[in-house]
Image (cartoon, rainbow, N blue to C red):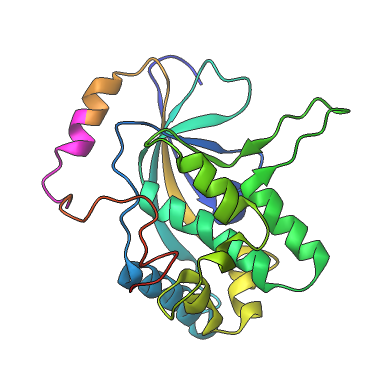
Amino acid sequence: MSAGTIEANKEILQKIFSESFWFVIPEYQRSYVWQTDNVTELVEDLVYVFEHKPDHDYFLGSLVLKKLRESSFPEYEVLDGQQRLTTFFIMMAVLRDLVQMPQYVETLQKKIYQEENLLENVPARMRLTYKIRDKVEDFISTYIIAKGGPRKKANSKHSLTEIMCRYPIWPTLCLFFGSSWKTYAGITIYSSSFDFFLIRHCLFTYPLRIRKMRSAFLPPSIIEGSR
């Protein structure tokens, strides 16, 4: 990408969670604040469209990214779209623990985490790296990256695991992999040399953005369940 450019693309979810994209959530971003209703609505929409409109594409939303020029791999700072991206990140881990076939377990695990391979000089790396708060990555390692992690927090009907268990697992899994029906997101990528401060100002002062939700990373209503 040349200096000072903007790219706009439509990418399917399979590619977003592939070797083509690695994400950094910067420290100035708000924490993850989606609640049970947000996640339930997303899951219900995905299942409904898959079951009733399989010939139609499903638009997941928009991502606004900044390409990190100093990175040796395709790494992007997330300027907008963190909430939905994080939700799909968690959903991948939940699906991984719900399926029974080892092949699919490993496929889903690779979507969220790259295992270290010293022979091939491949470092361990999470699909999403969070710089928002201290100890966030420890939480993710324990409850998302580790197999069986989401079940440790699935203690009520409001947890993401329980929400997704309300639906047959195969239709849900097909939304991500192996289906001719495509789920995609609109992606806008700014080069590192673009006027980043202007971009941030436009994004974070846009009048239709609502920023009054309770600030807490991975709130209990999503992972642990409401008490």
> Residue 61 placed where, x, y %?
38, 56
> Residue 86 placed where, x, y %?
45, 52
Q: How many marks?
A: 0
> Residue 171 placed where, x, y %?
61, 79
On whether residue 207 falls in the magenta region, the answer is yes
Q: Is residue 15 left or right of residue 23?
A: right
Q: Is residue 100 above or below residue 219?
A: below
Q: Is residue 30 left or right of residue 64?
A: left
Q: Looking at the image, which residue is at 66% across and 64% down?
A: 96
Q: In the picture, residue 21 is in which quadrant?
A: top right
Q: Is residue 174 left or right of residue 194?
A: right
Residue interval drawn in magenta: 201-210
Q: Looking at the image, which residue is at 50% across and 48% down?
A: 139
Dominant secondary structure, magenta = loop
- Can residue 40 be seen here? yes
Q: Of residues 120 and 138, which is closer to you in this image?
A: 138
On whether residue 129 falls in the magenta region, the answer is no
> Residue 118 placed where, x, y %?
84, 28
Residue lying furthest right:
119
Q: In the picture, residue 191 is in which quadrant?
A: top left
Q: Looking at the image, which residue is at 46% across and 82% down?
A: 48
Residue lying furthest left:
207
- Can residue 181 be seen here? no
Q: Is residue 13 above or below residue 3?
A: below
Q: Is residue 166 left or right of residue 41?
A: right
Quadrant placement of the C terminus: bottom left
Q: Of residues 224 and 89, which is closer to you in this image?
A: 224
Q: Is residue 166 above or below residue 64?
A: below
Q: Of residues 150 and 107, which is closer to you in this image?
A: 150
